[in-house]
Image (cartoon, coloured by chain):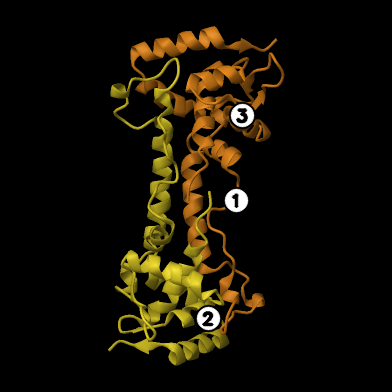
Chain colours: A orange, B yellow
Amino acid sequence: MKINKGVEWAAHACSLLGPLWPDKGLPLSALAEFHELPEAYMAKQMQALSRAGIVKGGRGRNGFYVLSKSPKEITLLDILLAVDGNEPMFVCTEIRQNGPCAQASEDCTSPCGIAAHFARAERQYRASLEKIDLESLNAGVISDLSPDNLRDAADWLSENHRTLG
Amino acid sequence: MKINKGVEWAAHACSLLGPLWPDKGLPLSALAEFHELPEAYMAKQMQALSRAGIVKGGRGRNGFYVLSKSPKEITLLDILLAVDGNEPMFVCTEIRQNGPCAQASEDCTSPCGIAAHFARAERQYRASLEKIDLESLNAGVISDLSPDNLRDAADWLSENHRTLG
């Protein structure tokens, strides 16, 4: 099972918008340029983030994206579900109700044991990502940057950001 | 992200083979019949389990599948990885090394923070499934069966099993 590649791109875009919140943002072209990604594909991820209420704006020739809420209120789980969808990884098709020893549907009031274990694992996966908000994510990302790189990124953000009017 | 549907089928097949271990098993046709699944697709899952060392046998006109090891030594994680593959869910393409503020590859000795959080979540997902061995899985499955269903399944296993040499 593979996570949609757009999740990586969307997470990096949110990370970049984090320090600009609440009143500053970046146009789509800058978000794509920073990550050296095709603008059309970056646009797709930003639209998914927008539908999920994580970013706003972006429309029109002079439009730009801004986080919709505080970096503390946006988690990696939010970004994953926005881009990859909210369907469970494991889908139970109730095959226990098939075949010569089929269980009657009225006896299947609780989930199949196999499905229940996969669901529990997925809850733990999601809980782990839910603990990581954009603020703590960025604290880690920034601490990994070299001083030169941090200055380059600060300069670039300073040149490319737009401010809400 | 979706788990391969064959994981559900393979897990049910292993669950069915559990009580027959160590010297009894089931032919492919019976495994498919019990779950009312197409034999060709059931065969694909059994081959994946065989490649992973979870089951053995199955070949030839009179062949049948037997668990390769004790149900205590087979976990839901083993079954997942056998059928769905061992690739990580989140693949980092190192986009931090792209663009106008690219981080130098020599500075990227530790994983990108975003990738590290997804990897941690996946470790927790896997750890949860690794705790569930086939013996405890089956204890739960059996406790969910009605008395009639348990008797039907026992009768069916008694009629359809084969015994090693």
Residue B142 x/y as whole percent: 48, 78
Q: Looking at the image, is B149 positioned above or below residue B3?
A: below
Residue A106 x/y as whole percent: 67, 76
Q: Quadrant of the C terminus of chain A?
A: top right
Q: Secondary structure at mark 2?
A: helix
- Comparing marks 1 and 2, which lies closer to the viewer? 2
Dot 1 alpha-carbon crowd within 10 angstroms: few under 14, some 14 to 19, many 20 or more: few
Residue B133 x/y as whole percent: 37, 67
For label 3, the residue is A46
Residue A53 x/y as whole percent: 66, 32
Q: Is residue B138 visible?
A: no
On the rendered structure, is A15 left or right of B26? right
Residue drawn at 40 percent across, 78 percent down:
B17
For residue B44, the mark is: none
For label 2, the residue is B33
* Residue type for callout 3: Met
Along the line of sight, the residue nearer the viewer: A131 or A115: A115
- Comparing marks 2 and 3, which lies closer to the viewer? 2
For label 1, the residue is A87
* Residue type for callout 1: Glu
Along the line of sight, the residue nearer the viewer: B30 or B68: B30
Q: Secondary structure at mark 1?
A: loop
Dot 2 alpha-carbon crowd within 10 angstroms: few under 14, some 14 to 19, many 20 or more: some
* Residue type for callout 2: Glu
